[in-house]
Amino acid sequence: MMVDIKKVTSLLEEVVSPSRVTDRDFDKIPYSRDLSPADPKMPTHVVLSETREEIQAILKIANDQDVPVYVRGGGTSHWDAFLPQEPGIMLDLGRMNKILEINERDLVATVQPNCTWAKLDQELRKQGLTYICSEAGGPAMTIGGSVMKAGGGPHSTAKFGFHGNQDVVTLEMVLPNGDIVETGSAAWPSAGKFKRQCLGPDLAGMFIGAEGILGVCTELTLRIRPATDISERLTATMKTLDDVIEFGHFINRHVGDEYMQGIYLWCDPTAPDVFFLMMDIFGYEREIVDHRKKKIVEKIKELGGEIGDRAPADDYFGRILTGLTDLFNAGVWHFFGAGSLRIDDITFLYNVWKEEVIEKRGYTKAGFGGQILPRDWLAFMVTNYREPEEWKELVKMADEIDEITLRGPVVPYGIGGRDGLRRFVAERDTGYYRLLKTLKKTIDPKNILQRGIFIPEEELL
Amino acid sequence: MRIEEYKDMIYACGRCEFCRGIDYNDRCPEIFTQHWESSTARGRMAIARSILEGQIEYSEDLAERIFGCFMCGRCREECKKAAQIDVIAITKAMRQDFVDKGIKIPEAGADMADTVTSSGNIFADPPKVHNKWAEGLEFKEGSGTLFYPGCLASHRFKEKTHILVQLLQAASYELDFLGDDQDCCGTPYWITGKMENAKEYAQTYLKKLQDRGVKEIITPCPSCFRAFDEEYPHLLGVEEFPIKIRHTSEILQEIVDKKKLKFKPVKKKVTYHDPCEIGRYRDIYDPPRKVLEAIPGLEFIEMSRNREHAFCCGGGGGCKIMYPDHSQTVSDERIRDFTETEAELMTTICPACEMNLTHGMYEADLDIRVLDIAELMAVSAGIVDPEILEPDYFPED
């Protein structure tokens, strides 16, 4: 597909200040990659929008000129989910980063999409509030990007889960045809932004996790809550994975949602039979937190596990997961063999890691980990690798592992473009996928938005 | 290409965007002024990698992204944690590649380096003008302790520099001064990439200092401080410069610690701007604060972005002369940080910061003085009249 670069530049400069439109190669190159090992993909233009009206105008140009639009938040996607699969306009939302309102009466905060979790939490904590269900990851992780991919992570919680659960209250989306849609209670013009599920279907759920193919998120209202003053951090080493599974069921069945933080499992490739657990307990009352801690410690001992020093967990959560310290010493990062699965099924993914990755392929640099969200695992394999020398080999190995993983009881987490997992979704041709394609065709008949992301272009012809 | 030396670092960028931080532009003055991801450290690593792989070439159009970096080190401070990429070294190498390849660099930058070569200072001052600040002061040739003000302090801040020497001499420092023999430290060479004369320049300068019997250099300028302490050893191929270098922040703290002067109350609310080149580059955060603490009556208020998180004044990396509009925009932002504190005085300890922040005050139409910490100390020690603290005071220089 050929794009008339100069013509599109000129049209964009008519609707957005010329200082916020570029078609120069050196400006476009940084937008050609994300955090993943996906091949570089260059946009034809980058445009920095500041308002939803500008986004409407950009989408109109894109429809008129048949040029796809891709959306850039913090640029830290792990699976090619926001890179230009075809020559097209990269919409950099960097300047739409404001906290619009913190409503401590209704306990909601409204933000623009490129506000980061860290920025929001910093402001909330000044008022004794927090958005507890944030992801791990760098400070550049934006709320819009995170919600549009239904993010989760070790700072998700057993009680509240990931963003797609209930913490997203309302969304404002600009559709590919320029229409503006508000979801939940915000859909009712004379009401406010306070409730997710009302006025018919939960349309927020349609956009969450859609990786931007159905609309550009321009505003989010999130549930916030008083900051928890009391917390405890525990570590334990379990003898077997079955013990970990039993412990996971204990958390969910016996004390269930009272535990605000899920358990986090880590297996190091140097000691694959050591099952290291980390867990945070939050609470408003010391008595309750102590009670939870006591129950956890008792159960771990009953299962033959050993309570350990909390220092490694502090190091992992604080220094590495949120501080990213030394993260790239052994090379850049890649997640693979990742997805959601039942608590009992963690053995399947662990065996893939141990047998296929370590024993069969002799790849000993990838660790295995996961966390129990409310009632399931979000599990993954992660490695450092050197670019460029190990790049292609790593991608080949990761693709093979993804293939094996997704044949099992694992639901892919993050779909992305041609270097992501979209082919696995397409080849299964489920009713879910057919409905998604119908929605996409209806909302975006010219396939303007995120063309080639999630759904290959030929699937929409 | 010079950047080949840094290939491992360039490829080590994990694209985590830690350099940009928790907000779009609250850390990096370049993205604050140029907006694009190509203005961030992550973007620059992507550009450098593309150049190494032959996908793009250095070009005149690219110059603003590379020479528009304020070299404030804010991104490097973050990257220390994740990937230890020396963004500043790579930026300097890229600038040098521009020059090596004969690609036009910002004219004002090239002129500045050429002016150093032709006149010995960045302002093309004749010695009489450049040394005017020293009128009425007596120096002790051969004392071994050289007071080295640098170009900005000599040319732009004559009164401040005069006061600083008065203060040091009152505290019994026996200072030598090069007088007409004083030349620029050479910083314009490495910030513009025009390195063709740099090694010879450093060799000549070292010989001049050694011939004069200089054992120690005291300078108020962080760039000069780092030039002698960091760049010269690199250029000369030695582990450390054979002459001891101290920035005045250390000397002022020494005056306090050793009780070399007595201080009277100064009833003012002040804040302090951390210069990038002594703060993030050299971890000198506490000495200026200890000096302020030692002055009775002062109320010290931190700006919201302080110490390693401090926002640049806009004067770094040669941007003040190469991209004056960007420089002013950054300065305006830093003045907004100042305004939030409701302080009566802005203090710092770097002539470049003092100049840019003063311009920021003018732009914001604020009657606020930007002072070197030494000036406050001199007032407190009774060496100069307190009138220099007042908003309507206007120095003759």
Image: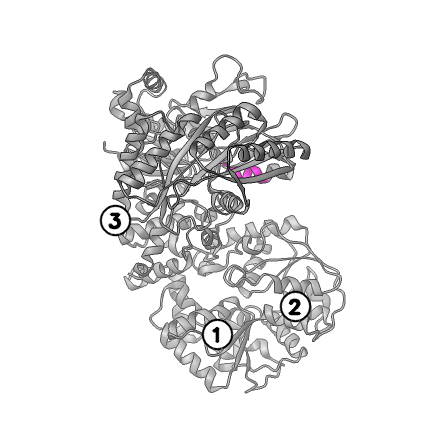
Query: Can you say which quadrant of the picture contains the C terminus of chain A?
Result: top left
Characterize the local packing of mark 3: few (<14), some (14-19) or many (20 or more) Cα atoms within 10 angstroms: few
Q: Position of residue B101 (x, y in %)?
A: 27, 61
* Chain letter for the residue marked with disc 1 in the picture: B
Report if residue A112 is visible in the image. yes
Q: Secondary structure at mark 3?
A: loop
Report x, y in % for residue A246: 48, 28
Q: Is residue A117 magenta?
A: yes
Q: Is residue B235 above or below residue B312?
A: below
Are the residues under badges 1 and 2 in a single subunit? Answer: yes
Mark 3–mark 1 Cα distance, whole angstroms, equals 44 Å
Q: Mark 3, chain letter?
A: B
Question: Which amino acid, mark 1?
Answer: Asp
Q: Quadrant of the N terminus of chain A?
A: top left
Q: Which region shows up in magenta?
A: A115-122
User: Distance between the Cα atoms at labels 1 and 2?
Assistant: 25 Å
Read off the residue under disc 1. B125
Point out the tag, 2 or 3, that comes first from the N-terminus. Answer: 3
Q: Position of residue B236 (x, y in %)?
A: 38, 75
The answer for which chain carries disc 2 is B
- Residue B375 is labelled as 2
Q: How is colour applied across the structure in the image?
A: one colour
Closest to the observer: B142 or B343?
B142
Task: Specify the label residue B55 is tagged with.
Answer: 3
Amino acid type, mark 2: Glu
The tag earlier along the polypeptide, 3 or 1, is 3
Give me the C-alpha separation between circle 2 and circle 3. Answer: 52 Å
